[in-house]
Image (cartoon, rainbow, N blue to C red):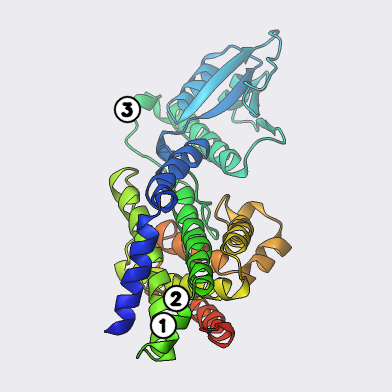
């Protein structure tokens, strides 16, 4: 098939370039490792949350209550009555006060109030975990008073808390690997893909192809598949390092992942082909391609979770294919989605690709 021959030629030319070798095979690992480390790429279950306990009385029930908190995944800092409050950035952003009269209130079955204070830098997820932990410690303390006491280390009941109506925000490598996959595919298609087309037009290669037995449709199909081949190599690199080096789970729907990545590859290939028709100079094609790719990556949630952006900006970002691709990957990888959940993402990416391809076909000049 003659378009495949053109596609192999474009892929071979791209792989011969030393800079493309770096950006396709080496840079992804560096980016993922560095930004995943900054974003907290470790196991979330091993994360310990700091909590300051202001102990206004030194009684046995108060000490047992603190032990119940220590038995959970918390770093407890106790401040006794009369001791100065610690200060500085290392101090936990949340504190709970055990008031004077705590033991008497429990012994006499009276109401007692624990005050939980949080600073502005405290995350909502951490505060939720602290509230759950306080309720668990209170229940265990009261049960121990009623049943004669028990050691928290012997507790056989565990509790995992999560948002009832929301989704967890992707963190660590579960944010950086999908985000960087989307960004690097855009970079490869909108820089090398568009610059190669500009070089072929400047050197008269497209003119010679137009004079060959190849039809215009075959030439366009070959160029589109060439950019898709480069994007496929980039996707394969990220899938490989995600599975082998960073050990992330790509979700429970291989079919959904394949459908999403395929439509995104085709969409990116069409955008790369369109970018190559807009500029005469290879340098301008590559430079503008980098700029546009970084803008789409930043607004599309490739660098940080889109949940941290204002609602209006998050909504506006869906004019770019990066936002649909990143959200679809999070749907599969972080939120346990299936093929049905990402069908709208695939449909939008396919429509964007068709629109970009149609404009590229009208603009591409072979002579």
Judge from the rendering whether residue 319 lies leftward or rightward of residue 351; answer left or right: right
Instruction: Return the residue at label 2.
Output: 205
Determine contact: label 2, label 1, CB under 8 Å. yes
Q: CA distance from mark 2 to mark 1?
A: 6 Å
Residue marked by disc 3: 154
Checking the image for residue 209, the label placed there is 1
- Residue 17: x percent and y percent? 40, 54
State whether residue 346 appears in this view.
no
Q: How far apart, in angstroms, are the residues tagged by discs 1 and 3?
A: 77 Å
Quarter of the view holding residue 77: top right
Is residue 298 shown above or below 76? below
- Across and down, in percent, residue 189 comes to 48, 65
Q: Residue at x 66, y 22 (%)?
A: 89
Label 3 crowd bin: few (<14), some (14–19), many (20+), radius 10 Å: few
- Residue at the outermost top position: 82
Q: Is residue 362 left or right of residue 228?
A: right
Q: Would residue 39 be visible to someone looking at this image?
A: yes
Which of these two is toward me, 80 or 45?
45
Cβ–Cβ under 8 Å for marks 2 and 3 = no
| Of residues 305 and 149, the one drawn nearer to the viewer in this rendering | 305
Mark sitting on residue 34 = none
Q: Secondary structure at mark 3?
A: helix
């Amino acid at each position: 098939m003659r378009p495949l021959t053109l596609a192999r030629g474009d892929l071979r030319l791209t792989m011969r370039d030393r800079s493309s070798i770096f950006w396709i095979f080496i840079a992804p690992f560096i980016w993922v490792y560095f930004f995943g480390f900054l974003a907290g790429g470790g196991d979330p279950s091993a994360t310990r949350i700091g909590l300051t306990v202001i102990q206004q009385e030194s009684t046995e029930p108060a000490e047992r209550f603190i032990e119940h908190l220590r038995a959970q995944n918390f770093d407890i800092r106790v401040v006794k009555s009369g001791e100065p409050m610690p200060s500085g950035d290392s101090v936990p952003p949340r504190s709970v006060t055990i008031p004077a009269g705590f033991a008497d209130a429990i012994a006499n079955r009276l109401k007692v109030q624990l005050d939980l204070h949080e600073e502005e830098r405290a995350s909502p997820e951490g505060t939720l975990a602290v509230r759950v932990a306080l309720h668990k410690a209170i229940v265990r303390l009261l049960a121990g008073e009623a049943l004669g006491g028990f050691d928290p280390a012997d507790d056989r009941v565990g509790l995992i808390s999560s948002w009832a109506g929301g989704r967890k925000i992707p963190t660590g490598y579960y944010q950086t690997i999908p985000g960087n996959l989307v960004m690097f595919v855009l970079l490869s298609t909108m820089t090398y893909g568009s610059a190669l087309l500009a070089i072929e037009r400047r050197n008269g290669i497209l003119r010679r192809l137009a004079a060959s037995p190849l039809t215009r449709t075959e030439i366009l199909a070959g160029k589109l598949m060439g950019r898709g081949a480069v994007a496929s190599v980039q996707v394969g690199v990220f899938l490989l390092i995600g599975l082998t080096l960073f050990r992330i789970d790509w979700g429970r729907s291989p079919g959904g992942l394949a459908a999403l990545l395929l439509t995104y590859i085709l969409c990116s290939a069409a955008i790369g082909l369109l970018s190559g028709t807009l500029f005469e100079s290879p340098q301008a094609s590559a430079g503008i391609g980098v700029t546009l790719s970084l803008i789409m990556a930043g607004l599309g949630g490739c660098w940080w979770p889109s949940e941290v952006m204002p609602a209006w900006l998050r909504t506006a970002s869906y004019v770019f294919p990066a936002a649909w691709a990143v959200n679809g990957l999070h749907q599969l990888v972080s939120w346990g989605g299936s093929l049905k959940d990402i069908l709208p993402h695939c449909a939008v990416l396919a429509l964007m690709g068709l629109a970009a391809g149609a404009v590229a076909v009208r603009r591409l000049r072979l002579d």
